[in-house]
Amino acid sequence: MISFDNTEIAFRSKSNRDLRRAYWLFKIIGSPTFVKIGKIVTNFFLAIRIPIGWAIKPTIFKQFCGGETIPECSNTIQSLGAFGVGTILDYSVEGKTSDDDFDKTVDIIIETIQRAKNDNNIPFAVFKVSGIGRFDLLEKASDNSNQFTEQELVGLNAIKSRIEKICQKAYENQVSVFIDAEETWIQDIIDQWTNEQMVKFNETFPTVYNTLQMYRHDRLSYLKEMLEFAKSHKIIYAVKLVRGAYMEKERARAVSKGYPSPIQPDKNATDRDYNEALNFIIHNKEHFALCAGTHNEESSLKLSELLQQNSIFPDDSRFYFSQLLGMSDHISYNLADAGYNVAKYVPFGPIREVMPYLLRRADENTSVAGQTGRELSLLTKERKRRKS
């Protein structure tokens, strides 16, 4: 039986200095007031271009990011790999709007695929469609009632071409690639394009993964529809299962535009659907590949038990667990120690351009009930254990 309370295993890759830094970071993140003030100050410094890298890089950036470039992530890749934990290189630069920037992002994503080739420590690549194409075009394309100008069609075709270029490279290099989920009002077209890429590239190997956010009340039924899609197209339907990242924004938009919220009524409903999705995938395992992206201990234990109950070896390459770098090491390292496939999302990019990601991460830690407290209690326990 896996114990997520084993802090010796959870933090054995961390020095005393690492533990001390993590402890104080989570202390700070645990204060909504401090996070709010910190965001205002940081955004002000960024706006007037005051250098802040000297303060950010050795603290929050070091905790949650692998480096500013792919080569800078090498130490993190090796450190994780030494304990059986894989790396997912995540280029976390946001907010770009020009075709030149989108094409540059595609090139960097392809570099992560090439870096992953033949490296067992890097099982996946990842990208967001909104990182390689204009959000307004994605929004318009998700509404089937819209008519497009010739210029908009050119823009949409460019996005599709970028997606296919990435997926083709992943296929050629035998590297699986996650296409991340986004807001509901652009997700329909992302689902459509992702499924098209699966039909092209997932016949014998799970090259392309779609991401399902289970805080949406319609995703369990969608997953069940995808079983029939997989059967009819004779493909492996590869899924990254997450709870979700846009809840407040989704609810606010639904209220402002007067449509029913796409979000589950409460956390229990989200947890129920997430765990039911795990169950459904495992019981139809011949048609699916799965990465369970979760910081939830109950869901992580449930998946490990489902694998065992269905006589699936822990290291079966079709089934992975994933968490974010700098968080939930008690889940990642204890699962890896027990022989399960585990990978950490390792964000990277220039500090100034990754700051929106880091600020959002601070927000999410503050808003997720119990997350920061759990991290702090485990860090405290391990620091005491080392002193005893």
Image (spheres, rainbow, N blue to C red):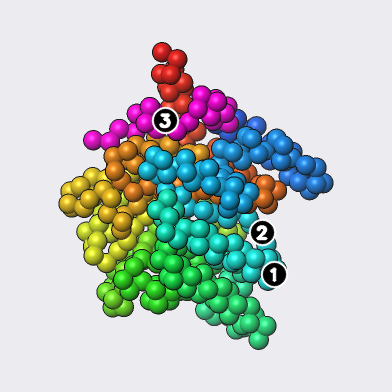
Q: Position of residue 238 (x, y in %)?
A: 36, 64
The mark closer to the camera, 3 or 2, is 3
Q: Position of residue 120 (x, y in %)?
A: 39, 53
Q: Is 277 positioned to the left or the right of 50 in the image?
A: left
Q: What kind of residue is marked 1?
A: Asp
Q: Which residue position is annotated with label 3?
A: 12
Is residue 22 found inside the magenta-colored segment of the image? Answer: yes
Label 3 or label 1, whichever lies nearer to me, is 3
- Visible in this render: residue 262? no
Q: Which sits earlier in the primary sequence, circle 3 or circle 2? A: 3
Image coordinates of residue 174 in percent, x first then y, are: 40, 66
Q: Mark 2: which amino acid?
A: Gly
Q: CA distance from mark 2 to mark 1?
A: 13 Å
Q: Quadrant of residue 85?
A: top left
Left or right: residue 230 versus residue 374 is left
Relative to 279, 363 lies left or right: right
Relative to 39, say whether 127 is above or below: below
Quick one: 37 or 250, which is closer to the camera?
A: 37
Residue at image mark 2: 95
Q: Is residue 374 magenta?
A: no
Label 1, residues with CA under 10 Å away: few <14, some 14-19, many ≥20: few
Q: Residue furthest top?
A: 388
Residue 147 x, y percent position in the rendering: 60, 84
Amino acid marked by disc 3: Arg
What is the C-alpha distance between the residues marked 3 and 2? Answer: 37 Å
Q: Which residue is mark 1?
A: 100
Q: Nearer the viewer, residue 136 or 377?
A: 377
Q: Is residue 288 above or below residue 368?
A: below
Q: Residues in magenta?
A: 1-25
